[in-house]
């Protein structure tokens, strides 16, 4: 019976550690998503400015071509 108590304690500990790791990954994912949104907004603004500039409008591709 002692081994079941020890095993239960070990499993609870593993569960708590895994749960905390999952929470941290979710927080990190939220930070990365927010950063990507800011970058996307900056890219759009710069693309719009380049498209409106007559000297760049016809000659500068707005997005790099895929290799």
Image (cartoon, rainbow, N blue to C red):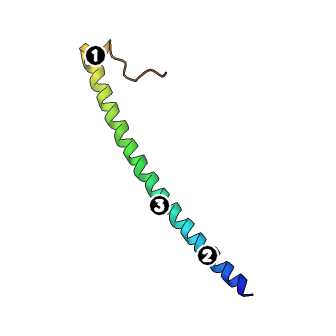
- Residue in the image at 49% along x and 57% along y: 25
Q: Quadrant of the N terminus?
A: bottom right
For marks 2 and 1, the one nearer the N-term is 2
Secondary structure category for the residue under label 1: helix
Label pair 2/1, CB-CB below 8 angstroms? no
Real-space Cα separation, disc 2 to disc 3, in angstroms: 18 Å
> Which residue is at 43% across, 52% downward?
30
37 vs 12, nearest the viewer: 12
The alpha-carbon separation of the residues under discs 2 and 1 comes to 61 Å
Q: Position of residue 7 (x, y in %)?
A: 68, 78
Q: Which mark is residue 56?
A: 1
Q: Is residue 55 left or right of residue 24?
A: left
Specify few, some or many for label 2: CA neighbours under 10 Å numbering under 14, 14-19, or 20 or more.
few
Relative side of 67 to 5, left or right: left
Cα separation between marks 3 and 1: 44 Å
Judged from this view, the residue extending furthest toward the bottom is 1
Which tag, 2 or 3, sits closer to the chain's start? 2
Say which residue appears at 31% left-offset and 36% top-offset: 42
View extreme (right): residue: 1
Locate residue 18, reporting x and y percent. Answer: 56, 65
Q: Residues within 10 Å of mark 3 (few under 14, many from 20)?
A: few
Read off the residue under disc 2.
Answer: 12
Q: Which mark is residue 24?
A: 3
The residue lying at 46 percent from left, 52 percent from top is 29
Tell me the element at label 3: helix
Q: Residues within 10 Å of mark 1 (few under 14, many from 20)?
A: few
Eye-nearest disc, 3 or 1: 3
- Total marks shown come to 3
Q: Earlier in the sequence, mark 3 or mark 1?
A: 3
Q: Are marks 2 and 3 in contact (CB under 8 Å)?
A: no
Q: Is residue 28 above or below residue 1?
A: above
Nearer to us of marks 2 and 1 is 2
């Amino acid at each position: 019976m002692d081994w079941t108590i020890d095993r239960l304690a070990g499993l609870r500990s593993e569960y708590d550690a895994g749960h905390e790791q999952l929470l941290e990954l979710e927080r990190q994912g939220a930070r990365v998503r927010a950063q990507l949104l800011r970058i996307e907004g900056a890219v759009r603004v710069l693309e719009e400015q380049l498209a409106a500039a007559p000297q760049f409008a016809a000659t500068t591709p707005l997005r790099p071509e895929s290799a």
